[in-house]
Amino acid sequence: MKFINFEESLNMIDSIKINSYKTKKLYLCNALGYTLAQDIISLEDSPQFPTSAMDGYAIKHQDQKLGRIRISSINPAGSALEDEVVEGSTIKTFTGSLMPKGSDTLIPIENVEVDGDYIKIIDEVDFGFSVREIGENYSKNQNLIPKDTIIDIAQIGVMASLNIVSVLVYDKPTISIISTGSELLELGEAQTNNSQIRSSNNYILEALVQKYGGEPLQLGCIKDDIDTITTSIKEALSQSDIVVTTGGVSVGDFDFVEDVVKAIGCKVIFKGVKVKPGQHIMVAKKSHGNKTKFIVSLPGFAYSSTVTALLYLVPLISKFQKANNPIKIVNATLKEPFIKRAKKAEFTACNLSLEDGEYKIDFEGKKVGSSAILTNMLGNISLLYTKEDDSDKFIGDSVKVVVI
């Protein structure tokens, strides 16, 4: 079997095109974290009229030279005031109130003294002070939030100000999760012999899918039996956009996943990557009309399946929502040496900290061993990324780190 290098496998994932997107309308606050499937266009100027930005007194700017100005009225926010500011008079005006007709400046409460029905000017202000002009926030027909933007708190607020009750978004892809292995026990299932182990892969993948924007469909653990695997993957494909499997994708006597995937008419995009942990990774697709579904088959060891899910499954989930890959790589400085152990791309669990504005990593509490040590993912976890041709690293070296 020929293994491709890690960069080549990422390029293949990056080149995948989604031909058909699912969309739906959601109530505004329920759309948090989704990607917009429409442009958000303003229908009017905001504000539509000159508006007060502070509590104070609406005046004609030149009247400040009078020293004393008569208070003729009061203008609470939301009131439909008909009184006008005329020469020598002022109207008390509050934050968010429309500026009264005839006024051009707002002098703050702090800049005056009240003397009966008059204000005395203590500190003058510039022309137009604290007046929000028409369109200060946005103008009519402006594209405020472009399509394909991920909806966060600011987008919620802007859309609420536009009286948008519900919004069109790209629907989250459904991800079916299957763990293969006759030795696996579900949560709560009784152990009957010492060779059985508790499954964690399907649960961490369910959590990972939720965390990174998919809708998980938990199908549990299945036996290493070709008929069972065939039935399970077919059923999963019928009700999901992506099927993710763990185990059964290596070269052992009971590793049937690749054979099944090919037998049911899927096209393998790649199988086998020079990466540690992982190596036996497969991504395949099955097209029907203009719709394409994907199978991501990951190793059975817990640490391996978690890391490779972050590298391959997460960016694929993002593609279904026209979103960027949320997994980021940053530069960091080593606080202790690192021994390069394989001529592969390696992803090594490390502790990430921010010190004096600089990312730094160490390996305190991280065990060196097989790809089954899931506890290495605990703590302020990130992954040191070293390439195939990298050598050992030393204290103070700048390295690449995958931020989780």
Image (cartoon, helix red, strand yellow):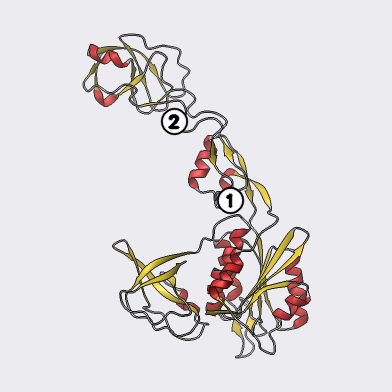
Where is residue 251? Give x, y as percent: 66, 87
Whether tag 2 and tag 1 are in contact, CB under 8 A, the answer is: no
Where is residue 386? Give x, y as percent: 45, 76
Q: Nearer the viewer, residue 7 or 174?
A: 7
* Residue at the spot of label 2: 136
| The quarter of the displayed image where residue 403 is located | bottom left
Q: Earlier in the sequence, mark 2 or mark 1?
A: 1
- Assign a secondary structure to mark 2: loop
Residue lying at 46% horizontally and 25% vertically, measured from the top left: 134
Left/right placement of residue 328 relative to residue 148 reads left
Query: From what the image shows, is residue 95 above or below residue 368?
Result: above
Q: Nearer the viewer, residue 175 or 318?
A: 318
* Residue at the spot of label 1: 35
Query: From what the image shows, is residue 27 above or below residue 10?
Result: above
Amino acid found under the numbered disc labelled 2 = Glu
Q: Can see residue 204?
A: no
